[in-house]
Amino acid sequence: MLQDFRSKMDNIRYNSCPVCNERIPSMSLVKEMCRRCYMEKKLPKKFSAENNMNPGDVPDELKGLTEIEEMLIAQVFTVMTVYRLRGGQTGYRGNVINFPQDIQEFTNRLPRHPSSLDVLLIRRQSANDSTAFRDFIVRRGKVGNALVWLKANNRYYEDIIIDQEILQSLPENDSIAKLLPQLNNDQIIDEISPDEENGDDGIARTFVPLPVSTQREDVAINDTLDRMQSNNLPLMWPEIDGFPINEFQTPGYIARAFPTLYPYGHSDLRSERPRDIKPAEYFKHLMWYKDGRFARHPRWRYFALNSTMRWRALQEGKVYVRQNLNDRQIDVTDIQEMIAKGDKNLADKS
């Protein structure tokens, strides 16, 4: 059975479509393009570069950036909680929210200072620092070259100011974990991520810390939350704006949150294009993008899944409101009374 499995895997061939740039196992090509693009007669073709659906190849300057390096150069701060699970895989919990950097007073300067990232590290006491913090390696030269390239080639970065003082304060090639709030507590790790129980040492990375509803709150968590939620405390660099980005009317917010995936600023979901693209098909298309970078990214795939789920829930809610628009307007008290009345009727029948 194992030999048969390996044989079938070896026989899988990946074909790429030059029109939509998707690369799918055993894709059948018709006249050197995928069947979907071939059958589509309307122009421009829906997933083509002419419809602003090709983000472009990643240059060498943006290849190999660590997660923390990408966060240092991103213009949009994406809120999500990502966990490393047993076996090295990752998972996430909670919802995704996007905040712009508050640049009204400080001008548009990059990179961020590490102390302004509001990243909270939670690790087991037994974790090995050399392996647990490998995702927090920062290379000064790599960050600088990435910003220079983005300023010259990305439409959203053309007006940025590269802050040489902040850039020179970054390590040449070292972890910045010591600059971030940390928490050593096996009990909180087990409580937050039950999948880690009896597993390998792991690390939970909260890209904006969430309130912890437990009496075992550590000083590190409280300090981080206080710094984020207070407008009076000084920050070493522009703070994250307190108002989330409008995900339906803000062009380029995805491209600015993930500059390594959208190197030229093209193909953002909310960008203008001749033919409309629905969110579900947009994310699915990029998951199949020819170089696989969207599917491999440790945070974008969770961003895509959560965004799709939230927007679908909003659409279903709107349908419900339209269907009941002529009914008597009810409030929360009315709904509670209806539920209680229904429970009473159910109890009487039983």
Image (spheres, rainbow, N blue to C red):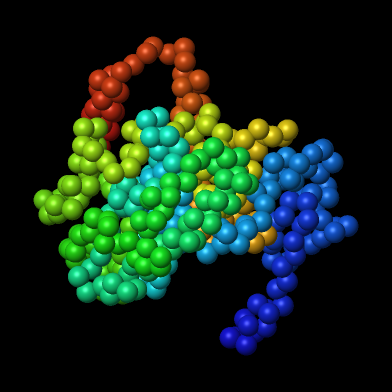
The image shows residue 266, relative to residue 206, as above or below, that is above
Residue drawn where x is 51% and y is 26% of the image: 319
Residue drawn where x is 35% and y is 56% of the image: 169
Which of the pair 243/194 is nearer the observer?
243
| Residue 143 placement, left or right of 174 | right
Is residue 261 in view? yes
The image shows residue 319, relative to residue 16, as above or below, that is above
- Location of the N terminus by quadrant is bottom right
Residue 297 is situated, as x and y percent measured from the top left of the image, at 51, 58
Q: Residue furthest right?
A: 31
Residue 228 is situated, as x and y percent measured from the top left of the image, at 26, 40
Count how many numbered circles sit on residues in the image: 0
| Residue 231 placement, left or right of 106 | left
Residue 341 is situated, as x and y percent measured from the top left of the image, at 26, 25
- Location of the C terminus by quadrant is top left
Residue drawn where x is 67% and y is 52% of the image: 56
Is residue 280 in view? no
Q: Residue furthest left?
A: 215
Residue drawn where x is 49% and y is 26% of the image: 318
